[in-house]
Image: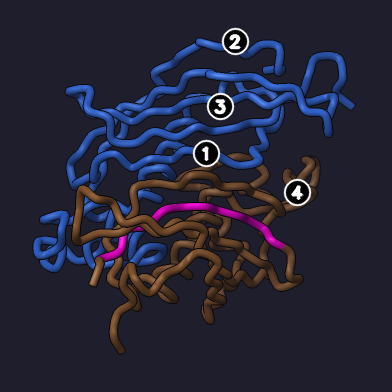
Amino acid sequence: MALLHFEDFSPGQKLALDGRYAVTAEEIVAFAREYDPQPHHLDDEAAKKTVLGGLAASGWHVCAMAMRLIVDGLVGKAAAQGAAGVEECRWLKPVRPGDVLRLELEVLETRAPTSRADIGFVKIRWDVFNQNERVAMMISAPMFLRRT
Amino acid sequence: MWFEDFQIGERHEIGDYTFTEDEMIAFAKKYDPQSFHVDPEAAKQSIFGGLIASGWLTVAVWMKVMTAHHTPEAKGLAISPGFEDLRWHKPVRPGTTLFFSTEITGKTDLKSRPHMGLVLNRNEARDQDGTLYMSIVTKVLREKKGTAA
């Protein structure tokens, strides 16, 4: 299959990725122990006493899980040249043990810089859905792609 | 710490962290398995010329340093609705040590939650020479004094 290049993307285009990410309590706690050791990410009992109402994944963990879905579902099929950042991220719903995440992408903007003939920017909105069809996280982020 | 206790312009050096190839590869295998994050040999042929950390590891490490810094003085739960303007300015390579700082850049009231306010911080990661590697604007909800349930 030919890799997707910059020219294959246009604003308004939508793409639902096939991948699913099953979230477990073990992984939520393991990630949080290492990188975000706050009680609501570590301990269900402690988390019940917070506004989250129970164990929830670190938002950074949700970003990482979404990245995995992007790598498996898009980056491997595209002439991707990395990313330089994230414009905005909103954590909208807690991500809990037993949740199954999937990703829908929408192209917001494409831009071919005059300074580089080989690279184009594609700004993409990521909507991370849970199994109840609620958006748990939204990201808008530019990525670089090779031009044909 | 209450919403009222945070002052715009307040800046702290919160700690440093040295990235190892082992951690970079282990993290990326799980969450960001692109060749330049997981395979040192393949990374040499990439545009980066060698193995680099997933940007998501760099920001997770910022959180790790932040939580270690905040634990003693943190009072109550810090819930965040999200972040903006995360930039990976330079690739992080094995052995890189980054020094993290945080500065309060804004405070806003919330119409939807009168008992809370939003505190904005600009956070930076620089090496020992002061070169900027990562920056991010984070947002945290804080309770206002005397309004706690």
Q: Position of residue A35 (x, y in %)?
A: 47, 44
In percent of the image, x 52 and y 58: which residue is there? A108
Crowding at dot 3, Cα within 10 Å, few <14 / some 14-19 / many 20+, comes out as: few
Q: Which chain is brown?
A: A
Badge 2 or badge 3: first in the primary sequence: 2
Q: Secondary structure at mark 3?
A: loop
Q: Secondary structure at mark 1?
A: strand
State which chain disc 1 sits on: B
Look at the image and tell me in which quarter the N terminus of chain B lies.
top right
Q: Which residue is at the front of the view, B90 or B53?
A: B90
| Alpha-carbon span between mark 4 and mark 2 | 33 Å
Q: Which residue is at the front of the view, A20 or B24?
A: A20
Q: Is residue B10 above or below residue A40?
A: above
Q: Quadrant of residue A97?
A: bottom right
User: Which mark is drawn over residue B84?
Assistant: 1
In percent of the image, x 59 and y 10: which residue is there? B7
Tag 3 residue: B71
- Describe residue B139's horizontal placement relative to residue B149 as left or right: left
| Alpha-carbon span between mark 4 and mark 3 | 19 Å
Tag 2 residue: B7
**Amino acid type, label 1:** Glu
Q: Position of residue A98 (x, y in %)?
A: 68, 70
Q: Quadrant of residue A135?
A: bottom right
Tag 4 residue: A45
Type of secondary structure dominating the magenta stretch: strand
* Residue furthest bottom as drawn: A1
